[in-house]
Every structure is written in structure tokens, then in C-alpha cells.
Image: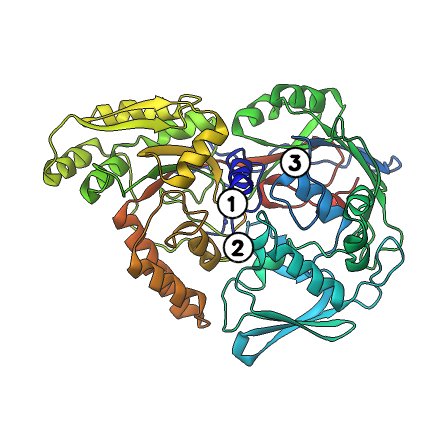
Amino acid sequence: MKKLIAMLLAAWMLTALLAGCSSSNPAPAGPSDDNPSSPSDSNTPDDSNSGAAAREDINIWGNMMIDNYNPVDWSYAAQNNLFESVYSTLIKVNYQEDGSAEAAPDLAESWETEQDGAAWVFHLNPDAKFTNGEPVTADDVKFSFEACAQSAFSAFKVAGITDIEVRDEHTVVINTGTYDARAPWCWHQVAIVEADAYQADLDAYMAQQIGSGPYVLESLDEATGNYTLVRNEAFYGTPAAIKTVNVRVISDSSSSVIALQNGEIDYMYMAGLQYDLVKDDKNIETKQQPAQYGNWVLLNSNVAPLDNKLLRQAIGYAIDYNAQYQVAFGGYVNQDNPTILFGTPVDPTPAELEMYSYNPEKAKELIAQSGLQTPIDIGDFYGGSGGRAELIQQNLAAVGITCQPVSLENFAMLEAYQKGNYTIGMMGGIGGNYMTAADQLSSMYVTNSSANLAHYSNPQVDEMIAALKGTQDKAAYDAQLKEILEVLIDDAGSFCAGKGAFFSAYAKGLKVPTADTGLVRFAELSW
């Protein structure tokens, strides 16, 4: 339980990349009726430094210290930045400029399916070697996936795998029993470790970080969280453009922006409120990045009076979403910004869904139809901070619903959500990094899923999601997805109070790729 709570806390702090594996193509937002403040990419890079020798080092902002250096037992972004630099994965996910994503080779040079999509055959790069000189083999892949399955943090990455077969030294087969629409996307963050060394001495392994990725860990200061990576000259793939990467942890957001402006760090990612501080700085480039992380309003439909669907629907219409965008994100939200918490880069949000919008009169009509007498008290509103819950409190009061925002200690609040000991709550930084709809829906909306903190339960939806996971025909898949979302919207078990826009901010002359939330792979940066 404690590990699961820690994982959820990481997600809530927007340091988690792994909200699920059991982005509506998130295109960079431009001005629109629903999103008037979202900018296009700004401060376009120039070639003023093209004549100078390219730097071979870079200083990267780290948002928090790492407290666990186990590459198969992790949950948040600070860990991911290290592990994806030092370790290979079977595949990687590349983002396009429009925010869509594609699966690309990493350790696996190629792959195909067998048994009507129930078996995935990966062919490994024969030149791949670990930093201790040992070759990367199919046995290492099998061990890494099986070790992931034993982790409270990482087991969801490999959920649904029935068995793994080693055909030869460079061929591994991952079986899912039946076709699973989540595969192979949900395996892109399984770090491949050197099985013998990992099992021989885990503490020594974590200190050395024996990987086969584009970088090697040169030094690590566990007291500060700072670490330095150097280019892996024996890497089997395209060599990293920058030789030395220095990650410097600055936990205070204001201090990190100052460090960027002073040139102490060269790259960081940020939300809209920080973006306002740097958007006019002529020494800093910015790039809006795809992002699917949202502010989640949870309604526990298992407790009165929220067991009344009309009341839940009324709450959906009572929320002033544009005001939430201003308070939480400075007005900067994604172009794909539905009021249901959904969005993946592979499966766009279906068109013509009837979403909730700010309509107090509609909310009052639904309350009148509900048979409940106003004022309706729904109790404590967990997650009250930064004015977001307080703003919803005012919205609800205007239609005859009362609640009391409460700020709990983070672990206590998350434990209450996990156990269902709440009526209404709010969490930020949820819903990102699900690649497919089948993945996100399985994690967040299936009955008793550990990520289903709203404790939403509808047997019909469970069956529909199971069918979606097994559907290969794209037209049928899209039609089923729309039907599922229509039921979820009607049931009103939870709402999205905004998916914030995120930005990469960096020194002039740095070339930055498109990446989820701005969490770029260090090996893809260049001067």
C-alpha cells in the first residue's frame, strides 16, 4: 500500500510519467475560442551562433532528488530522465511536431506479430553491449520484464503479458494471450538491465548503473541529487550529440527560472505560470510541447449524495472551466482540452462528443430533477490548494451545493482517495503518458483498477473496455472508443478541470525536439 501511495503521489506532483499501461493528438495549442491565451511556439531559434564551436556539455534542470536508483522499480520523471539515458528499451516513442507519436526502434531493430497479434517478436541489435562489456541478450530482456512485474511501481508496464520466450540470443517473443491494443506501446519504458550483475549485487548495480544506452553515469551526488552523464562511445545507435550532461537539482520553481535566466542551467521544462516569466526574455528560446496531464476532479459515486447521477452531472455544468485554466495554468492549456480526463497521442479524442461546459442554469435544472433539496452538502473537498478547490466551492455554492475545501498532507490525501474515504477531491498532473486509449481507459476507469481513484464502476464499461483492448480493426476501435467515452461522460464520475500547456525553455543555440511535456531525451539535444 505504501509503495502504491508513493506512486500516486509522484503522479500528483507531475513528476510521474507513468500514469498507466495496464495525448486526441495533443497538437501544440494555438489561439482558439476555448483556448484564447495559448501561444504557438515562440522565440524561434536563430543561427547567430552557427559560426561558433558547438558546446560539448549541457546543464539540465532536475526538479527533484532521486530516492530510488533501481531501473526496474521506479515511477517518476526525475528517475526516467536518468534511466532512459543510461538504459536501452525495446522500443522508444518519438513525437511529431503536431503532438502525435510513433513507435521507433531502440534495442529492437525490428519486430512483428504472430498468432493474430497475440505474440510480439522482437529482433535485438546484435551490436548492443552493456557498459561492463557484456552483450545484451534476449535473456536480459526476459529477466528485465519479469523483474518489472515484481515491482509495485512498475508492474503495470508489463500487465497483460502471459509469458516471454527466448528463441535465440537476439530474438525474444512477448506473449499477451490475445491481441492487446496497448502493446507494444506500454513496454517503451521497461529498462533492460544486465541480468547477471543485477542479481549478483543490486546495491552495487544501482551505484554503477550498468546499461546499454547512449550515456554512462560518470558521477552521482546522492546528497544533492546532482549527477553527470558522459557519452557512451560504445553505444550501438546514433551517438549522443552532447558529450557531457550535468543534471542540477533545483526544487524551488522560482529559483530554477532564475538559474535559467542567469545561464546556470541551459534547459528546463515548465508550465504556463512559469512561461510568462521567460516568454519575452531574448536570451531564452521556448517551445510548447504536447502534454496530456490534467487536473482531475474526482466524485465518489459510492457515497451519498454523489450516488445521484443527476447531481454529479450538475457539478459538471457548475464548474467554471475557463476560470480554472487561469488559476491553475495562467490561461495556457492544450488545444485538446476536453472536460473528461482523457487524451493520448495515438488515439485522438473522438469528434462531436457532448462535453460538459460552464452552464449554471443547466446545473440548477439538473438539481431540480434530482429530487434533492438545496442546499446540498457534499462535505469536505480534498485537495484544496492554490485556489482551485476554493473556486469550485464558489461555483457549486452558486447552484445550491456546499462543500468545504480541505488541504491534507499529501500521503494522507492520497490514501483517502485510494481507500475511497472521501466525497469530492482534486488532483493535478494526472492522465499523461498513456499512449493508447485502451491503456488509459483500462487504468483509470475499469472497476477496482489501482489508478481508478474516483472508484468509478460500471460493468457495461468494463466489458466495453475489454472489447476495445481486443479490437484490431481501426474503424471498429474508433467507434467503440466514442461509445465508451459517451457513457463515461453521461455517468459523470469525474471531470477534467484543464490540461495545462507545457513548454521547453532553453538557452539560445540549443536544438530541442518535440517531447511529451518537454521531458526530452538528453541524447536528442544538440548545440
Choose the circle earlier in sequence order: 3 or 1.
Answer: 3
| Nearer-the-camera pick, 344 or 167 | 167
Q: Which residue is drawn at 63% across and 55% down?
A: 148
Q: How many marks?
A: 3
Q: Where is mark 1, residue-wise?
A: 432
- The crowd level at tag 1 (other Cα within 10 Å; few <14, some 14-19, many 20+) is many
Provide the secondary structure element on which disc 3 rests: loop
Provide the secondary structure element on which disc 2 rests: loop
Q: Which residue is drawn at 80% across and 59% down?
A: 196
Choose the circle earlier in sequence order: 3 or 2.
Answer: 2
Q: How far separated are the C-alphas under marks 3 and 1?
A: 27 Å
Give the percent coordinates (x, y) of residue 186: 57, 58
Judge from the rendering whether residue 417 lies leftward or rightward of residue 48; answer left or right.
left
The quadrant of the image that shows the C terminus is: top right
Q: Where is mark 2, residue-wise?
A: 21
Judge from the rendering whether residue 152 lies leftward or rightward of residue 235; answer left or right.
left
Q: Which residue is drawn at 51% across and 42% down?
A: 1
Q: Where is mark 3, residue-wise?
A: 44
Q: What residue type is labelled 1?
A: Gly
Give the percent coordinates (x, y) of residue 354: 28, 49
